[in-house]
Amino acid sequence: MLRDITIGQFYPTDSAVHRLDARVKVIAVFIYLISLFVFSSFTGYAVVTLFLFTAIKISKVPLSYIAKGLKPILFLLLFTAFFNIFWTRGDVLFHWRFITVTWQGLRKGLFMSMRLIYLILGSSMLTYTTTPSQLTNAIETLLKPLEKIKVPVHDFAMMMSLALRFIPILLEEANRIINAQSARGADFEEGKLWQRMRSMVSILVPLLVSATRRAYDLAMAMESRCYHGGEGRTKMKPLRYEKRDFVVYGILVCYFASVIIVNHYFII
């Protein structure tokens, strides 16, 4: 059940994207997410599709593995498309009793669904190709100027790192609980919706207890090792830019320029 959740997990393989500096990938995802909200045409989404699937191909992360991450949000996709299709006014394509479908609703529903899918895929590529420690170092380095205004950058980066590390641990714990409850006769697949939701209580309660216990043990371990934040701490593997990172920066500039040009001159 929960094995299909791949969002937030690292996919270990050797690719050009994996070898990039983590700061480059964070900035690339940031630019990519901005471009998603700039486009409002099919031509624009063709540019985004080309950019995204080229990155996926170079990353060597299997498309089937990435597609698993979309299963948990399938209901959200259908919910978003449903409300945009039936609750958007415009040129009527179909009308039956209280059901009305408009051209503007179909277009808006398709755009919102594509935007949500591409947002999940693009942001997931960051965690698929970057280890939690690299991501933490990148975020801390990029936000370091905020320390001048007393923002606890290291603490923020550490919290993100711990959250990412806990995702696979909690998924593994949830799968163990599901297998144990299934062995005792619990059924999570059959029955009415409210019955299945009620049966999930037998998973959520022990999972919450386990997560709380792990968080407490981690806090005690950090305190016993005299952890007091990032002041004076050094890094075993500091981030360093290489030639390929500057090449990718150039590609990102070209991509964002094409975003602006396509959005301005091609409205289809």
Image (cartoon, rainbow, N blue to C red):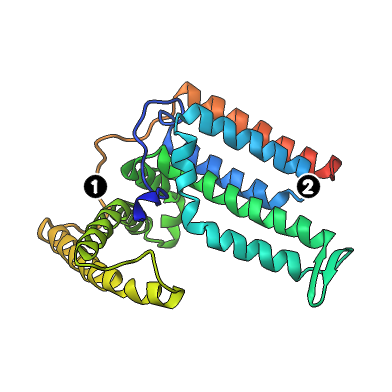
Residue receiving disc 1:
233
Q: Is residue 95 left or right of residue 199?
A: right
The residue at the point 26 percent across, 53 percent down is 172
In this view, the residue farthest toward the top is: 243
Mark 1 or 2, nearer chain start: 2
> Against 59, is 84 above or below?
below
Q: Is residue 105 visible?
A: yes
Residue receiving disc 2:
41
Q: Amino acid at mark 2?
A: Ser
Q: Is residue 200 left or right of residue 95?
A: left
Q: CA distance from mark 1 to mark 2?
A: 48 Å
Residue 145 position in % (x across, y down):
46, 51
Q: Which mark is residue 170?
A: none
The residue at the point 18 percent across, 57 percent down is 227
Q: Is residue 256 visible?
A: no
Residue 56 position in % (x across, y down):
52, 33
Considering the image in quadrants, where does the C terminus appear?
A: top right
The residue at the point 45 percent across, 34 percent down is 62
Q: Amino acid at mark 1?
A: Arg
Q: Is residue 2 left or right of residue 89?
A: left
CA neighbours of label 1 inside 10 A, class few (<14), some (14 to 19), many (20+): few
In this view, the residue farthest toward the left is: 224
> Against 46, is 196 above or below?
below
SS under mark 2: loop
